[in-house]
Image: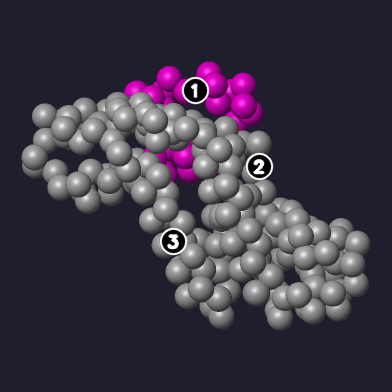
Amino acid sequence: MKSKILDAAIKEFSEKGYHSASTNIIHKNAGVSKGAIFTHFQSKAELFYQAFKYCAEAVILEYQKNTFSKIYDFFERLTAITFWKLEYFSKCPHIYRVITLAISESPPEIKEKINVELQKFLDLSGDLFFSKVDRERFSDDYSEEEIFFFFRIALEGLQTYYLKQELSFESFNQNKSLGLKFIKTVLKGMEK
């Protein structure tokens, strides 16, 4: 029952945002009583928080099915992961929307909990991106933290750009070369 509520909540929050989402619609779409929602979740804010956690965990679980850790070249791994994320989020736009809503529209009563989970998510993402990669290609002018920071900003920007365009997967594939040029430009600026 809890997963049915979360699925309905993810759909409702992603389509209407946190503030406009209706628990009446969520309970109807989940096929449960309104009381069942509040039996499992203390408030609309707690339901949103749990929906966000569910989405973040879904991304990580799906990511872990891949073998990106076997790609040792930094650029190749970043490229593979970036385009995997874009493909995944284009197929699961509700998950992407809930995660971005957690960043931009979290209600004050759960903002701190969301921030803790977001930091865990970002830390894990960073570990997944940057573990076991060859860092020898980078200039000594950049610390490891700076390299990761610059790439994270570039990747988040690229991902946001493509997802805001609401490109179809076919359009995304056509625009892939532009995204690759962007990542290469960032990389070239930090190479030896």
In the depicted structure, whether residue 173 falls above or below residue 139? above
SS for callout 1: helix
> Which stretch appears magenta?
155-181
Q: Quadrant of residue 133?
A: top left
Nearer to me, 144 or 156: 144
Residue that badge 1 annotates: 175
Residue 45 vs residue 69: left or right?
right
- Which residue in the protein does label 2 denote? 92
The number of numbered badges drawn on the structure is 3
Q: Is residue 131 left or right of residue 111?
A: left
Residue at screen point 30% across, 39% down? 132
Where residue 64 appears, as percent x and y from the top left, is: 52, 42
Residue 12, visible in the rendered structure: no
The spot of residue 60 in percent (x, y) is 53, 48
Q: Residues within 10 Å of mark 2 (few under 14, many from 20)?
A: few
**Residue with the mark numbered 3:** 120
Q: CA distance from mark 3 to mark 1?
A: 31 Å
* x and y percentages locating residue 149 in the rendered image: 28, 49
Going from the N terminus, do you reach mark 3 or mark 1 first?
3
Picture coordinates of residue 159, whole percent (x, y): 47, 39
How far apart are labels 1 and 2 at the CA level?
Answer: 19 Å
